[in-house]
Image (spheres, rainbow, N blue to C red):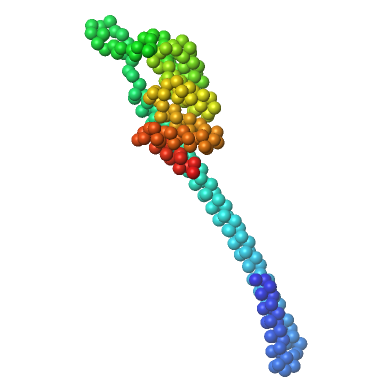
Amino acid sequence: MYRELKTMTAVVATAVILIGLIGGCCTKRDVDAINTRLGMVESQTRETRDMIARMDSLLTATTASNQQLQNDVRSSSDALAQQLAQLLENYNDLTTRIELLSKQPVRVSPSSSPGSQTQTTAQPPTTSAPSKDCLDTYDNAFAMVRRGEHENAIAGFRKFLADCSTHADVANAYYWIGECFYLQEKYNEAIVEYEHLLKNYPNDPHMASAIYKLGRCQQELGKKAEAKTFFQRVVKDFPGTLEAEQAAQRLKDLK
């Protein structure tokens, strides 16, 4: 742009001189007038050049600002998408736990009131009758899970497993230990507990959730092939469940 203005100035100056030469003799007054006009043209050219430079600088700054704004918007959108995915994961986990809790058998303490024998549920023959200490230990550990005291809950469930190895809630204890590790992002430790449950208690009601969480642990550890295997198993073996829906979505994300 500046080069074009400079060329125009030279053309104008040449044209003025030629007009003067064609029109006749040039007096000193004519030369002074021409010089004055040339000075005005040069001054206007400088002003125009400065104005163009300012416009170029403004355009450059605006372009950079727009690019930064686009980058910020893109980064914010990505961050929001990740937060939404995490919230959905947490919501699904919470829904799963509520569903599982609703399936927990209601424990009725023996009562001395008449007819209390009709309220007592017979224990499975493969497990011993629950003692009050075992029930208290399990319930206390489970209460700590709900309070987010994961390390204390793990210790409580470990004590329960050591003292009440034939109790009906042994499988549940292994599952919740795995959940505590998972919630602490200790995925290798969680895998150990889930796999123990899978191997020794294949008919446990937590099985769909445990297999799904095995897939999530493998995914978080960057083992996509192993994660796909577990997710596919959930979709195949537990159709129509919340875990199957979650696993199907994870399989789409892993493609």
Q: Is residue 163 above or below residue 4?
A: above
Q: Residue 142 falls in which quadrant of the image? A: top left
**Residue at the farthest bottom position:** 24
* Quarter of the image with the N terminus in it: bottom right
Observer-nearest of 74 and 217: 217
Q: Is residue 122 above or below residue 174?
A: above
Q: Is residue 69 left or right of residue 24?
A: left
Observer-nearest of 130 and 21: 130
Q: x, y (%) of residue 109?
A: 32, 11
Q: Is residue 200 above or below residue 15?
A: above
Q: Is residue 180 visible?
A: no
Q: Is residue 101 visible?
A: yes
Residue ID at (40%, 17%): 169
Q: x, y (%) of residue 146?
A: 43, 23
Residue ID at (42%, 29%): 209
Residue ID at (46%, 33%): 230
